[in-house]
Amino acid sequence: MLNTLYIATASGTNPYANLALEEALLNAVLPGECILYLWQNQNTVVIGRNQNSRRECRVEALERDGGFLARRLSGGGAVFHDLGNLNFTFLVHREDYSVPRQLDVILRAVQALGIQAEKSGRNDLTAGGRKFSGNAFYSSGGRCYHHGTILIDVDAEKMSHYLHVSAGKLQFKGVPSVRSRVVNLVELVPGITVETVRQALTAAFGEVYHGTPLPFPTERLAGEELRRLEEKFASWEWRMGKEADFTYALSRRFFWGEITIQFHVSAGRVEEAAVYTDAMDVFYAQRVQQAWKGLPFTCGSLCAAVKALPMEDQEQAQMSRDIRSLLEECML
């Protein structure tokens, strides 16, 4: 039986620190407690536990623009976060875990602000048939969390730009996102802000659970654990190395000939590369594919390897420029 309600908030907008705090709160929640964690990420794409980032996100473009790619513990699809979005997480022990009750907090909060909303499907909340909140779930050791997004005034242009499959041909095993028509709450209630939604959520939390939410006592969190978890979420191995193996192919015709490039990627690195071309130079392509083996599968590392190869004549110099241009066009 729940007897204590806590509100926890993130101190910043770094997604790796915020995901670390979420997991630390999960480890810290005690029987009889429910924690509502409210947090925001800046310019971030968050993918589900079993997703391939290349299918979900223009990773290179996002990171070139100073954004972040993050992978969460829970399943589900890819989402875009900026400061027009508010994230929530309910953290409880299994015996007190109730998705309908938790969703009722969100519904009651937005209804109090004049928005007629409803649950749609397994894990979405909609208003007027358009999605404003997607939800996902995770459990470990008898503890559970349910988290989601609330689109208040998200940059729809950035969302569309980054949540877009790259121009190359990608084949892999994984869980694709299901795209839905979305709506910002500010379109439904002009003038609504993240802060008004935050206040409404806090009030609805107390109403639904019949208690007064208190600030979570942060002294229960170990600084060393938070640092370790942040390092995990920020690491290449967690974000990219957890990708299922996949193949990626791109091709183009240039004046010197046609080229087709195929990559087999495992744990985020190029396991094998093949370069097929009818160019007159029969050796350069072999040197390129050897240079790529073992590298991280990023546009920057692949282009740098091509640029670093010695070029014996003007044709090889042109091939180098064109291959780098093709990689940038398809991967950025």
Image (cartoon, rainbow, N blue to C red):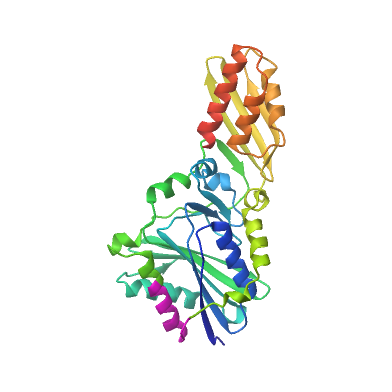
Q: Is residue 138 above or below residue 260?
A: below
Residue visible at 56% across and 36% down in the picture: 169
x then y, percent, for residue 318: 57, 17
Q: Is residue 107 above or below residue 268?
A: below
Number of numbered discs on residues:
0
Residue visible at 62% across and 83% down in the picture: 31
**Horizontal arrangement in the rendering, residue 37 relative to residue 238 (left or right):** left
x then y, percent, for residue 186: 32, 61
Q: Is residue 182 above or below residue 322?
A: below
Residue 23 covered by magenta stretch: no
Q: Quadrant of residue 331?
A: top right
x then y, percent, for residue 95: 60, 82
Which sits in the foreground, 162 or 4? 4
User: Magenta region, mostly helix, strand or loop?
Assistant: helix
Which sits in the foreground, 150 or 215? 215
Residue interval drawn in magenta: 199-213
Residue visible at 68% across and 61% down in the picture: 228
**Horizontal arrangement in the rendering, residue 177 relative to residue 204 (left or right):** right
Which sits in the foreground, 326 or 37? 37
x then y, percent, for residue 3: 54, 87
Residue situated furthest left in the rendering: 190
**Horizontal arrangement in the rendering, residue 223 relative to residue 122 (left or right):** right
